[in-house]
Amino acid sequence: MSNAATNAGRADKRRLARHRILKGGLITVAGHHTAIPCTVRDLTESGARLRLQDAASLLPEPFELMIEIDGLEAECQVVWRRGGELGVSFSKTRRGTPRRAQIVRPLAR
């Protein structure tokens, strides 16, 4: 079966629409005393796909994901691991005021 067919099959099983994004996130453990940077690649209301540079297999559970630009904090459980990527489900989420503004300026012509 091709990757496209496999991915299409997975998409059909998802309950919520998954949105492809590229945002910086922080994985925090030990009461926010340890922070590990990550990239958030996909996001739904119930979970996310995260990319880490190192030690994805050594990450303790549960952990908290923070996406500062959106003001999102979520308690996470790992659903799957592949190389440097993790699929996580959210057990609890909190949305607050974004901690910094996302500024997108048009390119000057």
Image (cartoon, helix red, strand yellow):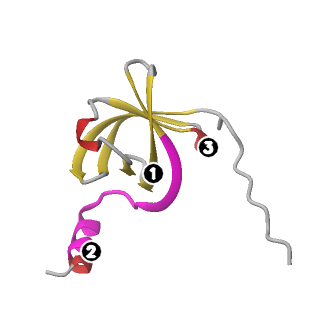
* In this picture, residue 9 sits left or right of residue 91: left
Q: Residues within 10 Å of mark 3 (few under 14, many from 20)?
A: some
Magenta run includes residue 56: no
Relative image position of residue 13 (x, y in whole percent): 23, 63
Question: Does dot 1 land on a helix, a strand or a loop?
Answer: strand
Relative image position of residue 24 (x, y in whole percent): 53, 47
Distance in Å between CA atoms under marks 3 and 1: 12 Å
**Residue 1 against residue 92 in the figure, above or below:** below
Is tag 3's residue or tag 2's residue first in the polypeptide sequence?
2
Q: Which mark is residue 69?
A: 3
For mark 1, what is the residue? 40
Is tag 1's residue or tag 2's residue first in the polypeptide sequence?
2
Q: The residue under label 1 is which amino acid type?
A: Val
Is tag 3's residue or tag 1's residue first in the polypeptide sequence?
1
- Asked if disc 3 and disc 1 are in contact, CB closer than 8 Å, the reply is no
Relative image position of residue 77 (x, y in whole percent): 28, 37
- Write down the quadrant of residue 15 in the picture: bottom left
- Asked if disc 3 and disc 2 are in contact, CB closer than 8 Å, the reply is no
Q: Residues within 10 Å of mark 2 (few under 14, many from 20)?
A: few
Residue at far right of view: 109
Question: Does dot 3 land on a helix, a strand or a loop?
Answer: helix
What is the count of numbered marks? 3
Residue at 38% from the left image edge and 51% from the top image edge: 51
**Residue 88 against residue 33 in the figure, above or below:** below
Residue closer to the observer: 99 or 10: 99
Residue closer to the observer: 73 or 37: 37
Query: What span is colored magenta in the figure?
Result: 6-25
- Write down the quadrant of residue 90 in the picture: top left
Question: In which quadrant is the N terminus drawn?
Answer: bottom left
* In this picture, residue 81 sits left or right of residue 30: left
Question: Does dot 2 land on a helix, a strand or a loop?
Answer: helix
For mark 2, what is the residue? 8
